[in-house]
Image (cartoon, coloured by chain):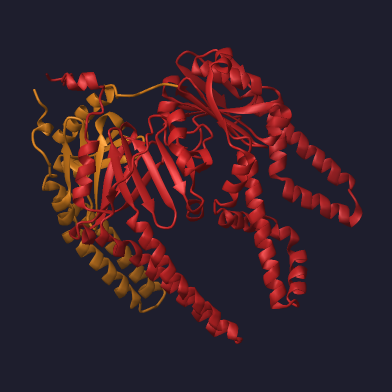
Amino acid sequence: MQSVILESGWQRLSIDSVKVERQYVALRFMAYALLIAVMTTVQMMWLDLSPWWMWIVAGVVAVLFILKFYYIPRLRYDYFRYQVDEEFLIVRSGVIFHHIEIVPLVKVQFIDTSTGPLLRRAGLMNIQVNTASGFAVIHRLEERRTIELRRHVERFAKLEEQEEESL
Amino acid sequence: MTRRVHPLFILMSALTHLRSTIIPLGFLLFNDLKNEGFGKYTLIGFCIFCLVLLLFGVASWYFYTFTIDDQSIRVNKGIFRKSERTTQRRRIESIGINQNLLERVLGLATLSVETSSDGIEPEVELKGVRLKFATSLKATIKGEDTQTEQTEATDSFRVSLNDLFFAGALSGRLGLALVGFFAGYQLIDQYIEKYVDRIFNELAHLSLLLLSGLGLLILLLVYLGSIIVYVVRYGSFEATLNEKRLTIRYGLLNRTEVVFHQDKVQALLVEENWIKRRFKRAHLSLNVISATGKEEQMLFHPFIREADIDPFLERFLPRFERVKPMQYAADHGFFYVVRWRLVWYMLLFSAVNTGLIYFLTTPLKWAGLLLYLILPIYYMFARTGYRNTCYGFKQDVFVLRRQLVNRHTIYAPRLKIEALSGHVSRFLEQKDLLKFEINLRGRGHLSAGYFTHHQFEDVRNWYQRSFLKTDRAEAGDIRYDNE
C-alpha cells in the first residue's frame, strides 16, 4: 500500500500551525511587556526619572508584535509547502526570503523530532531532516504526518545509494 | 589491541607547549638578561617550568591510547577530562599523514582520519607516531599491504617549482599576507612598543616621497614573503593514482600526505582569477572530506594550462569530464547583483573623502576623489562577470560557474550533491529571478545567480532522478513496512 504522504503533490501545514505560532508570539511578547513595565516602574519609583524613552521601546515592541503576531504567521503559512515523493523531500519556506530545498532521502543522516507544551496541545511537532551538508526543517507539522514522514525517511536511510564506496 | 603512541610524543608535547609560550618567555628572559644578567631564581623558575611541561607530556602520553580493530578505531585521551572517540572504519572518507617541522626532526607524524561528520577537526587524530608506523597504520586502516601500494603505482605527477612560484605570485595572496603581517605585528607589539614609537618619530621627519617608497618596499617584501610561504607550503607537490586511490603529498617543511578513493571526491573546483586568465592558467582543487581537518578544498594543481585540463582530468579523475556550461544568468538580474555593493562602496568612499577633506589642509585632501573612479571600473568588471555566470549539466555531472572578477567553476557529480536549493527575496521572485545553491558534504557549497525559475526547474528535473542502486530502483524494489 502506498504511503499517505506520497498520495498528492504539495502539502501545506495545518491551519493550527498559525494558531500555535501566534500563541507562542503572544507569550513571548507578554514577557517583553512585563519586562518593559518593570523597567519603567524601576526608573520612575527608584531612580526618580520620567522615562519617555520607554515609550519608544514600547512602540518598537508593539510594531514588532503586530508584524509577528498578525502578518508573519499567515505569510509563512501561505508560502510554506512541502512535498515528499518516492525519493525526495522538497521544502519551500520563508517569509521575506524564499527558499526551496530538494533533499534526496538516501542522503539523510539522522532525523530530529521535537515538541513542546503548546505544540503538544495542538497535536503538532517539529521535524528536522539532517544530511551531511545541512538540514531541512518543517515546523509545526501534524503529529500523525510527522511520524509517518519520519518512518518514510528512515526506510530510505537504510537503502543503498548508487555509490557508497569505502576507502 | 590497545597501544600507545611513541614515547617521543612526550618531548614533542613539551616542545610544542614551550613554543606556544616562546614570546612572553623570551621577553622575560631578555629583560632579565638586559638588567642584571640571568639571576639564580630566573634559571630555577625556567627549569621548573620545563619540568612541569615534561611531566604534563608524560601524563598526556600515558593516557593517550588507541585501538584499531576490524570495525572501528578508538582513541582514548585526557588526563583530567577523559575522552573516548570511536569511528566506524566503513565511514572513512580520507586518511592523511601530516608532519610539521618538529615532527620531521623527531621522525614522527600525525595520522588523521576523516569521516563525513560536520566537525572542523579530523574525526581521529593520532599525534606522535613513528612515520613508518603511521604509514603501516594507514595501510592497515585501508586494509591493504604496504608493499602492494608501492609496486602498484600507476600514474603520478609533480608540480614544478617554477609553476609553484608563478602560482604563488599570481594567486592574489597579498591581502592575506598583509593580514598575516599585521596580525604578527599585533602579537609582538606590546613587547617592542617603545622601539616602534622611536622609529615612528624618526620616520615623521622624512619626506612624503621617501615614505611612499618605504611603504612600497614593505608591500614588495610582504608580497615576496607571500610567494615564499606558498612555495614552502606546497613545495614538492606530488599526486599519485594507485588503482583508484589518489595520494596527494606536499610541503617543504610541514609535510602533508592525504589518501582518498577517487570516488570520494565531492567536486572539482576550477579557479581562474583575473590575472591567471590572462595567462590562460587555472588552479584546480578538490572538495574532499580531507584528513588534514583544516581545508576541505585540497589543492590538485596550482597552475595548470587551460588546454591541459581535459587530458589531465582524463588521467586522474575521468569522472569529471568537463562540460561547457551553456545556460547563462538572466540578463535582467544584473542590476540586483550589483546594486547593494555599489551603494556600499559609494558610502565607504564618501566617508573616506569626508574624513580627508575635513582633517587635511593640504591639496592632498582631494586625492580621495580618485576612489570614485573605482565604481565604473567595478561596474564594468561585474557586468562582464555576470554575463559569464552560467550552469550546465551532462549525464551525471553538474557545472556551475560564478564570476564577478574571479571565475569559479565547480563540477559536481549528481550523486555527490547532498541538496539542491534555490533562494530569492519576495521582491526578486516576482521578477522571475532566483539563485541556485548546491550543497556538498561538510561545509562545501556554491551558489550563483540570478537565473529564472524555468532554468531552476530544468536543473531540478535533472537532479530529481533516482539515487538508489539502479537495478533496485528500476525493478521497483522500494518496499514499505506496511506492504
* B14 versus B194 height, above or below: above
Q: Colour of chain B?
A: red
On screen, residue B380 versus residue B178, left or right, reads left
Image quarter where the C terminus of chain A lies is top left
Task: Say whether residue B173 is visible.
Answer: yes
Residue B388 position, x and y percent, is: 35, 54
Q: Which color has been applied to chain A in this rendered view? A: orange
B109 or B177: nearer the viewer: B177
Relative placement, left or right, of B175 versus B207 is left
x, y (%) of residue B332? 25, 62
Examine the image and state in which quarter residue B346 appears.
Answer: bottom left
Residue at point 8%, 36% (across, down): A8
Above/below status of A122 relative to B93: below
Whole-percent x and y of residue B432?
19, 57
Q: On the picture, is A72 further left or further right than B319?
A: left
Asked where in the image residue B137 lies, by quadrant, the reply is: top right
Is residue B115 visible from the viewing direction of this image? no
Q: Residue at x 83, y 55 (%)?
A: B31
Residue occupying the point 77% across, 65% down: B195
Residue B299 location, x and y as percent? 52, 39
User: In the orientation shown, which residue stands out farthest toward the front?
Assistant: B307
Near-viewer residue (A128 or B84): A128
